[in-house]
Amino acid sequence: MVIVQIAPIAKGKVIVLPEPGRVRVLQELGEESSAWTILSTLRQRAADSRQEQSDASGSIQSSAGDEIEDLFHGWESQNPVAYPDREDTQPDMMRADGPTSRVSGLEKGAAIGDVTLCDPRLSKLNIRHWTSVDISDDLAAKCISLYLQTDHPLLGHFDPELFVSSLISEEHEYCSSLLINAMLYWACQMYSAIDPQTDALATAFCVEAEILWTAERELGHDSTLTLAAAEFLCMGYLGQGRDHAVLAYLAEATDMAGRMGLFSSEAQGSSQETRTFPHLTGAAKAAHMYAAWGIFNWLTLMSLFYHQPGMLYPSSPPLIAVPKGPHVDTTETSLVLPAEVVSWVPAYMGDTFPYLCWFWTIVREMTWVYYVGGQTTLGSHGSLAFAEFKFRELLAWTNSLPPQLLSKQYTPHHVQVMHIWFHACVLDLFRPFIGRKHLRYQRLRTFASNTCSPSAICATSTAQLKKLIVNYRLNYESSKVTILWHTALIYVANAILETNPKDKDWYTYLLHCLYGYKSLSQSWRVAKSITKGLLSLTIRKGGMSSEKASQILRDLDNNDIHQMPGEIRATFMLDLDRALSEPDTATVEYLANQFEDNVIMERYTNLFDKNPI
């Protein structure tokens, strides 16, 4: 037998591989350079071999339910972070929309209206120095604070300590009027869940940010502050359902990052050189680290969850170090990216951002291969071997997470969202193979389990996403404020509508998704269009009668007079299955606009009839 000593990482433990099949395993890992991927594979093969020996007399089950059971029993001990213990969660829709919560992304134990400033210096804010929009210092401080403690741990567009210091001292080295107006365009949309009248302020901040943006572009000056402003404008237009400008600002930010040497994209080719910035030190270096990884992470997220024609994709990650706090010990967890301590990281940031940088670096190659047609040494575009390789990398990433980043019921909200992104990514990774019968149930080569297939992996991640959705909606007030987690709602809704026969609890989880968007629609106009699109998709999939869908749509309509009127644009994918073959008819916008037509088709034809409720 082969004995692999794991030291010092596992502190003396060994992995024992049985004689049969050891050569095949070593051949499969021959080209692998990631120590964590090799370690994860060896651990899994040893565990699977023991499982096979104990189950040798049993028959192989092929149903989806048996696959899930096999995966939980086979993977749980080796990948407990990705697949924690299952527990039956009975959703309570009344409680999920209730006014109280045990844990809040705003402040632990606080109701959504109780916004405590995350930094006491914000109480000294003089907002008139930065904007002409008529907003009080107190409200502006609350909006900025809400963004900083809710979304910034996940986005990291700038160094938060340098930003707040410059904001309050009215210095312009790490803060600018353009950045403040662009950020408040986003933050006021968030805050409208607390005070609906701030939605009008969001539009006013957008107008001023556009004016400042035009003036800045005429000067042609690239900076980390202008880069962050472009990201906020992109995000703000996306959330407000004004999709026409999203790709434009995304392209502006990508081109600017390329000119600054932060990273490269496929649009730039080899014309831009990614730099390490060895001459920078101190605050200037920290500002560039956050800027580089903030735009890279955001662009990769957009390319995965919002991919559409015209989207740009990173062709390489930044070379500059990842910013981390002084208390983040990467020696024990083996953060594979070079990291550098910044002077001060606020407590609300936690330790999530450095590990998200690693996560999006893994995902970047997936989007490059799947959506740009890039080639790898593992085979052709979208090959199952490539998917298995990336899955191994993702599992290795989860196994490296420190205890404070594990998916537990009461971890910080940004940890919950990080795990949501992980499982959504796994679903996208194996989605192309679910529709191919010869690949759907094909066993992955580096897993000894006979039922470890794309179908089983997707079923398992869907089950985890369901659990995460219920926990996040029940226990985190931030679920009503931030839209960064909504990908889980789209992915779970798609999964339950594609399952035939449907699970007994499918309708309950569909309602969780729909009512999740109802809560989000108080802040985000685009959520209304997604809700209508999901109901349209449900009718088209034969899961719901037109009468029932129309009734639910009426119940969900907030009819908020404070939100800006007009058409809602949303050209990202909603029908994830059809997106693989007919993307033009799979968008949020298309499906929402088809709702009335689908109602008529369901009512007067049998085109969609599959025993709708």
Image: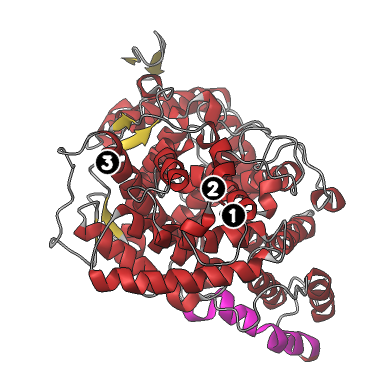
Q: What residue type is labelled 2?
A: Leu
Distance between mark 3 and mark 1 Cα atoms: 27 Å
Q: Which residue lies furthest to the top in this view?
A: 12
- Mark 3 and mark 2: Cα distance apart in space: 23 Å
In the displayed structure image, the side of residue 406 where residue 266 appears, left or right: left
Q: Distance between the residues labelled 2 and 1?
A: 8 Å
- Seen at 81% across and 78% down, the residue is 550
Residue at left offset 75%, top offset 85%: 599
Mark 3, residue position: 284
Asked if the magenta segment contains residue 591, the reply would be: yes
Coloring scheme of the render?
secondary structure
Residue 411 shown left or right of residue 604 in the figure: left
Q: Is residue 38 magenta?
A: no
| Residue highlighted by disc 2 | 125
> What is the secondary structure assignment of the residue under circle 1?
helix
Taking 380 as reference, is 249 above or below it? below
Instruction: Give the residues drawn in magenta, as a range.
Output: 584-603
The N terminus: image quadrant: top left
Farthest residue to the right: give it: 94
**Residue 61: x, y in percent?**
62, 43
Task: Tell me if residue 405 can be seen.
Answer: yes
Q: Quadrant of the C terminus?
A: bottom right
Under mark 1, the amino acid is: Ala
**What is the quadrant of residue 8 in the picture?**
top left
Residue 160, percent from left and from top: 44, 42
Coordinates of residue 158 in the picture (x, y in percent): 39, 47
Contact? badges 2 and 1 (CB < 8 Å): yes
Name which residue lies at 68% across and 38% down: 107
Task: Report helix, strand or loop for mark 3.
Answer: helix
Dot 3 or dot 1: first in sequence order is 1
x 24%, y 41%: residue = 320
